[in-house]
Amino acid sequence: MNEGTQDIPAPLGLLAELTHRCPLQCPYCSNPVNLERRSGELDTAEWKRVFGEAADLGVLHVHLSGGEPTARPDLEDLVAECREVGLYSNLITAGVSTDEERLERLVEAGLDHVQLSMQGPDAQINDFVAGMRGAYEKKLRTAKAVGRLGLPLTLNAVIHRHNIARVGEMIDLALALGARRVEIAHVQYYGWALRNRASLMPNRAQINAAMQVVESAREDLKGRLVIDAVVPDYYARFPKPCMGGWGRQSLNVTPNGKVLPCHAAETIAGLTFETVREQSLADIWYRSEAFNRFRGTDWMPEPCRSCERKEIDWGGCRCQALAFAGDASATDPACHRSPLHGHMLAVAEADAKEEEAFVYRSFANAGAP
Ligand code: SF4
Ligand code: SF4
C-alpha cells in the first residue's frame, strides 16, 4: 500500500481495450464515437508492462477486449504474459475472425475464459445488427470450438428494441452452445448507443415481458445456466453501481494507453486522463485527479449525500449525470430521487416510438481522421 492511500481499495479487474478495430459494426458499441486508429495503439511491450503493473497493483482478472482483440497478432503473447504474472484472462470476442487453430494457440498460452457476443438468435437478426453477412455462422463455429477446447464460455446477448422479444431464444441458444453463463445486457446508452438511442430504445411493456421470460428461465435452468440480466437505466427506479463505484473495483485502459474509471469517462470535459505511457498504473489509480474526483462519497451533493443507498450504488453513473444535468457531479437521473428522472423517462418513451435507421459503428461513420 502506498503512503496516503490506505483507504483506497486495490482494483480487482482491468478492461484492456487492445484495439478499436473490429469486423462488426454494432450500432450500440460501447467504444467512443471517435475511434482510435491502429497507429495509436500500445505495442506488445507496453501492454506487457501494463499487465505486470496490474498484477503488482492487486488486479486479479484481465478482460481482453476491443474492438475485436483477435485483430492483434500479438494476442498469444499478451495472454501468455497474463498467465506469467498471475492474471486470469478473459477474451471478449465477436467470434468472427478466429479459427480453431488460433483458439488452440490461445489456450496453450494460458487463456482462461471466453465471452462471445451474439447479436440475435438466428442469422437474419444477428447479421443485420452486427452489420456483417455470415457473422452468425462464424460465431456458432467459434462457440463450438471453445467447447471442444474445454474453455468455459459466457454468451453476451446485448438487448434492444430489435431483439428484445427474442430473449427466450437467446437463452436457449446459450444452453445449446454449452455456455455456463449468459448475460442479458440491455444496451447502455453511451458512445455509439447514445448516437443510436432512437433506433434502439424499447418501451416499458417490452422490457417487462423480457424480464418475465428471464425470471422464469432462471427458475427452470437453476444449476444448468447462470443468467445475469441488466435492465435499462432509463426505466429503472435506482441506478446501477456503475463499475462498482468510481475508482473502487476496476479500471479501463484504452488502445492508446489512457486509463479510465469507466469506458465513457472521456465524455466528462474538464477531467484529464493520464496514460500508461507516462505514469505507472499504481500512480494513476491512487493519485490521479480523475480517479479521485468521484471516489467514495465526499463529492456527493444532495440527495445522494444523505441517502441510505450511497454506498450501494455510489450515486450511479457520472457520465449519465453529465449527459442529462450538464453536471457530472449531479445525481444520476436514473434514480427516481433525481429531479431529472421524469425527463429521462420521457426521453425513453419518445425514443421508443421513433423509427430511425442505425448509424453503424465504423471508422467512416466516426469521421475519424
Ligand atoms: S460491440 Fe460490436 S462493433 Fe463494438 S467491439 Fe463489440 S463486436 Fe465490435
Ligand atoms: S439518491 Fe443518490 S445514492 Fe440515493 S439511490 Fe439515488 S443515486 Fe443512489
Image (cartoon, rainbow, N blue to C red):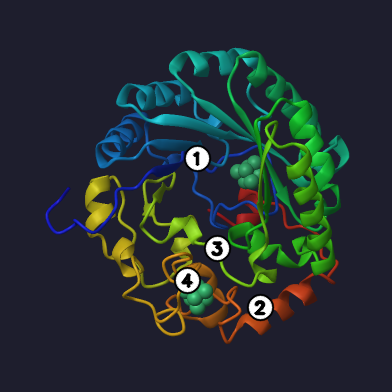
At x 38%, y 44%, the residue is: 12
In front: 245, or 128? 245
Q: Secondary structure at mark 3?
A: loop
- Assess disc 1: are there few (<14), some (14-19) or many (≥20) residues with their C-alpha within 10 Å of its C-alpha: many
User: Separation of disc 3 and disc 1 at Cα?
Assistant: 27 Å
Q: Position of residue 127 (x, y in %)?
A: 80, 40
The circle on residue 240 is: 3
Q: Could you tell whether 284 is left or right of 154 in the image? A: left
At x 56%, y 13%, the residue is: 104
Q: Are marks 2 and 1 in contact (CB under 8 Å)?
A: no
Q: Secondary structure at mark 2?
A: helix
> Which of the 4 image quarters holds residue 101?
top right
Q: Quadrant of ligand 1?
A: top right
Q: Identify residue for label 4.
A: 309
Q: Position of residue 73 (x, y in %)?
A: 49, 24
User: Separation of disc 2 and disc 1 at Cα?
Assistant: 33 Å
Q: Is mark 4 within 8 Å of ligand 2?
A: yes
